[in-house]
Image (tube, grey):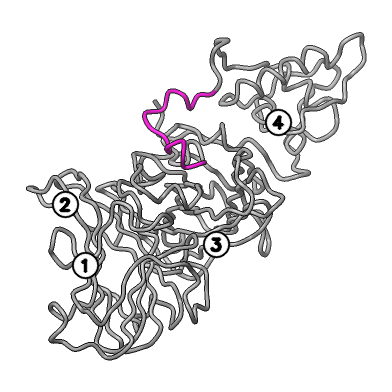
Amino acid sequence: MKDLLKLSFFLAHGLLVLGTTTTGGPPKCNADNCYRALFPCPSPSAVSVASAFCATITASGTTATNYPIRATNACGSTPDRYISACKCGPTCSFTTTTTATATACPSATPSNGGVVYGDFECPSPSPPWTVQILDPSFSLSTTTTNSFTGNRSLRASLTSPSTCSGVCTNARIISPPLPITPNTEYKLTLATFFPNNANGGTGSTGFIGVQINGRAGLTIDANDSPGRQKWRFTQSPWRSLASETTAEIRIEWIGPPSFLDTVTFAPVSAYSGSTPPPLGILPGGEFENGLGSWTQQVPDPGTTAGVVTLPLPGQVNPDYRFGSHAWRVVSPQKPNPANQEFLVSARLISPTVSVIPGRKYLISFSTYFDAFGIGFVGLMVNNLPIYTRDPADAGQGGIGWWGPNTVYWTAPENASSAQLKFEAVMSEAGTMGVDAVVMVEVNPAAVTA
């Protein structure tokens, strides 16, 4: 099987390809971009519609004009292009029971993740994604050369010097309509990787943008932390409106070649309780139903801890806060070290999950602080400390903010299980919070730091 499957189904409006007719003779078969747009082999239903159209395009000596919408960008609005493509006919065949090439894929995003095949483990992202190539020098294809989870990712690349001048959308993928509940909190996840520029430079060349139901809410620049040549994992919140019962996700490339992987979209409530989460192996990391299968310890009797309703007092941004609940620790006054346990005022403990020895895991979560100098949140895995975050760290974003944290942990050769502990190490009066905890196995070869 080829490692790379080209997916350039659509071209920019008005693009013309060299002539498809022979002077003085009938149209000839040119398997060009018009042909590929008319007969997208990964979509049996589209091929069926195109075949029916071709059967009637010159019926009774009259040329039909009901051109399939998906092909008009590449074929234009004159019949000769369509007649030429129809002359070729479909080169792919399907049985009557085939609905999508993706059904034979080895793995896919769990169904409760909302986006089917969002991990791009299939040779093609379409179906169910609709692929639009707006810049003919741009290509979208799945690849096994660089992935975050699983074996494949979606690669966006330039096949020739871009014809785009200024800022423009090179390509996009569009999800099918996803059923959603009105007035409900959702979580979108995705992983991105930006290589260095073709000239070896690292100057910004654009970004990946995400829209859900036409509302732009997330952009990822090539030079956002942690920079180029590394995978970055992003969690992004989204709330449905009272009138919305479906969601359409559009992911657009504005400039830079890149890799995309691990796209999921699910209600925040799906990450609560004890059921398997839409992404990863750790249940209950959103605390929408309380602690659930998590536990807590509060060594300091002067401290209160537990799951509370959001927003927290003084909270100034919602970007890395998900749902309506989070774990919070409050010390109303300067803690007495004699009452603490190794200066720990409270700790949050995950359920034990199974891991594979030697495999690498992402641990992503959000932290909150209401003042500088109050201490830090520490993360331990199997009682070994691996990470700390305090309110002065650059990645936190500031006071009153929920800041994202990305940690990678490799399971030791003798470890078959893992348990996370978040410790609130408090030195002054203040408030700390933890939310949106995700743990997922990543590709061992993925460059993450």
Image location (x, y in percent) of residue 430:
35, 85
Q: Nearer the viewer, mark 3 or mark 1?
A: 1
User: For the magenta stretch, what is the residue range?
Assistant: 100-114
From this view, report whether residue 13 is shown above or below residue 222: above
Image location (x, y in percent) of residue 247:
63, 46
The mark nearer the N terminus, 4 or 1, is: 4
Q: Which mark is residue 161?
A: none
Q: CA distance from mark 4 to mark 1?
A: 64 Å
Q: Based on the displayed image, in which of its 4 quarters is residue 85 positioned?
A: top right
Q: Amino acid at mark 2?
A: Ala
Q: Nearer the viewer, mark 4 or mark 3?
A: 3
> Do labels 1 and 2 touch, CB within 8 Å?
no
Q: Nearer the viewer, mark 4 or mark 1?
A: 1
Residue 119 is one of the magenta-drawn residues: no
Q: Quadrant of the N terminus?
A: top left
Q: CA distance from mark 1 to mark 2?
A: 25 Å
Circle 2 residues within 10 Å: few <14, some 14–19, many ≥20: some
Q: Which mark is residue 207?
A: 3
Q: CA distance from mark 3 to mark 1?
A: 43 Å
Q: CA distance from mark 3 to mark 2?
A: 33 Å
Q: Which residue is mark 1?
A: 297
Q: CA distance from mark 4 to mark 3?
A: 29 Å
> Do labels 4 and 1 touch, CB within 8 Å?
no
Which residue corresponds to the image point at 87% horizontal and 10% vertical from the top-left?
59
Which residue corresponds to the image point at 48% horizontal and 68% vertical from the top-left?
310
